[in-house]
Image (cartoon, rainbow, N blue to C red):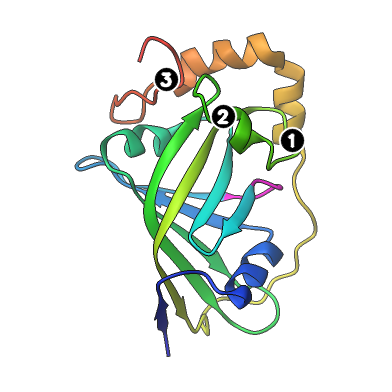
């Protein structure tokens, strides 16, 4: 039976920190809903009410665009090993960009992953657990290292060019805030 919580407890935090994969969902007031799988060492639970996620460069930048218009965000964690559990964390989020005053303070929570384009801060409003009985059991072989290697090879200038070309607007043409021009 699912349960609701106002904040993360120690059990939730341990479960989240053990997951090699999580999902991020955002939506603008109208247009396409975004749901993305995320991995690598890109998520930190700061306390019972706040999570930071290091948003690495990808083919799109929907989350940043959506948060400019609607700060609603959901993170979902699933147990693919051990006891079944699905944990959803709902809240209000914002994108922190490299030129924002609080970038350095937020960035210190993460290692040196190449391709960091934003840090997403989620203020938790609701935590919901559910059974996860229908989630398959799977073995994790490891993390794919292609994204950090690609970003490292591109370098800072190459990443900024990529952001201007591929990450400045969403699928619906909404600005993401990653470049000075939007």
Q: Nearer the viewer, residue 108 or 89?
A: 108
Q: Where is 41 relative to 156, above or below? A: below
Residue position for label 3: 168
Residues at badges 2 and 1 in contact (C-beta under 8 Å)? no
User: Total marks drawn?
Assistant: 3
Percent x, y for residue 3? 41, 83
What residue is at 55 percent from the left and 23 percent from the top? 98
Q: CA distance from mark 3 to mark 1?
A: 22 Å
Q: Where is 24 relative to 82, above or below? A: above
Q: Secondary structure at mark 1?
A: helix
What residue is at 37 percent from the left and 9 percent from the top? 181
- Read off the magenta span: 38-42
Give the main secondary structure, helix, strand or loop, of the magenta stretch: loop
Label ID, residue 146: 1
Percent x, y for residue 182? 35, 15
Query: Quick check: can you spot residue 60?
Result: no
What residue is at 52 percent from the left and 80 percent from the top? 132
Percent x, y for residue 55? 56, 38
- Which is closer to the viewer, label 2 or label 1? 2
- Labels 2 and 3: the sequence-earlier one: 2
Percent x, y for residue 120? 50, 41
Q: Residues within 10 Å of mark 3 (few under 14, many from 20)?
A: many
- Which is closer to the viewer, label 2 or label 3? 2
| In magenta segment, residue 79 | no
What residue is at 48 percent from the left and 20 percent from the top? 166
Q: Residues within 10 Å of mark 1 (few under 14, many from 20)?
A: few
Q: Where is 153 relative to 76, above or below? A: above
Label ID, residue 103: 2
Q: CA distance from mark 2 to mark 1?
A: 25 Å
């Amino acid at each position: 039976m699912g349960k609701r919580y106002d904040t993360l407890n120690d059990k939730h935090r341990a479960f989240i920190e053990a997951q090699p994969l999580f999902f991020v969902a955002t939506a603008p007031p109208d247009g396409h809903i975004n749901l993305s799988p995320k991995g690598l060492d890109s998520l930190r639970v700061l306390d019972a009410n706040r999570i930071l996620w290091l948003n690495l460069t990808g083919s799109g930048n929907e989350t940043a665009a959506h948060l400019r218009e609607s700060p609603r965000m959901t993170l979902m964690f699933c147990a693919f090993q051990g006891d079944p559990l699905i944990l959803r964390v709902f809240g209000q989020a914002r994108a922190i960009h490299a030129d924002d005053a609080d970038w350095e303070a937020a960035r210190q929570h993460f290692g040196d992953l190449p391709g960091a384009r934003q840090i997403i801060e989620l203020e938790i409003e609701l935590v919901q657990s559910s059974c996860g009985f229908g989630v398959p059991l799977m073995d994790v072989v490891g993390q794919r290292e292609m994204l950090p290697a690609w970003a490292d090879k591109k370098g800072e200038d190459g990443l900024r060019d990529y952001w201007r070309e591929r990450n400045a607007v969403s699928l619906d043409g909404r600005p993401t805030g990653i470049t000075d021009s939007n």
